[in-house]
Amino acid sequence: MDQQIVLIPLVCTRCSTPIPAMADEMAWVCANCGQAMSLDEENGLIPQLIYYSDAISPNAVGKPYWVAEGQVQLQRTSYGSDKGQKQEAAHFWSQPRRFFIPAYQANLEQLLSQGIQYLISPPLLQEGPAARFAPATLDIRDVKSAAEFLVVAIEAGRPDKLKEIDFDLKLNPPVLWILP
Ligand SMILES: [Zn+2]
């Protein structure tokens, strides 16, 4: 089967400066005017808001995360005693949680450990000056499944023997934050 390859010229949406894009990258900042952009499958480059944490040290290279509020409705059952985990889980998910999905190149293990750590103790989001950041490679369309994966990992990691889990995650649209 013939495959059509369509090359989209990547130029800044504001000032038309060419964007040097590497394979797999999903978001860029124009070196000329500072406009932040992401790649949209249908529309090519589109303006993208990028927020920078004020906790990034001067001259340090930050890490991009997709950040989104999510509300989880969850039912879980355990083998044998649930050791109070049903209640713990109900309590943890009773409020909206902020999901931090690593957008930088991370393997599954890194995505899980960093994602869980920030889900349980979220970093403060206070805006600071723009900073350089590691390439953002995780597609925004993969954020929801990554967040669902974190929910499963948290529940499977509880000290009972998880038998079955059924949940629904309502996730707000993710935004890109650059964190230390
Ligand atoms: Zn520009």
Image (cartoon, grey):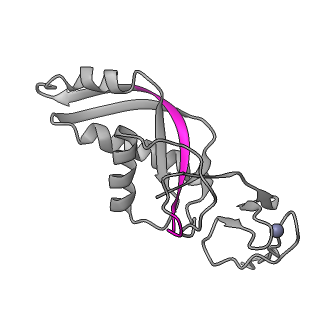
List x then y, in percent, for residue 115: 40, 49
Q: Is residue 1 left or right of residue 63?
A: right
The answer to if 135 sits in the magenta stretch is: no
**Along the line of sight, which residue is nearer the eye, 45 or 178?**
178
List x then y, in percent, for residue 116: 35, 46
Q: Is residue 28 left or right of residue 150?
A: right
Q: Residue 2 falls in which quadrant of the image?
A: bottom right
Q: How many marks?
A: 0
**Along the line of sight, which residue is nearer the eye, 62 or 128?**
128
Residue 54 in view of the camera = yes
Residue 40 in view of the camera = no
The residue most toward the right is: 15
Dividing the image into four equal quarters, which quarter contains ligand 1? bottom right
The answer to if 71 sits in the magenta stretch is: yes
The secondary structure making up most of the magenta span is: strand
Q: Is residue 10 left or right of residue 69?
A: right
Quarter placement of the N terminus:
bottom right
List x then y, in percent, for residue 100: 47, 47
**Along the line of sight, which residue is nearer the eye, 167 or 133?**
133
* Residue at 31% over, 40% down: 154
Residue 8 higher or lower than 78, as above or below: below
* Residue at 46% over, 58% down: 180
Residue 130 higher or lower than 82, as above or below: below
Q: Residue 135 falls in which quadrant of the image?
A: bottom right
* Residue at 48% over, 53% down: 55
Per the rendered image, the range of residues in magenta is 58-73
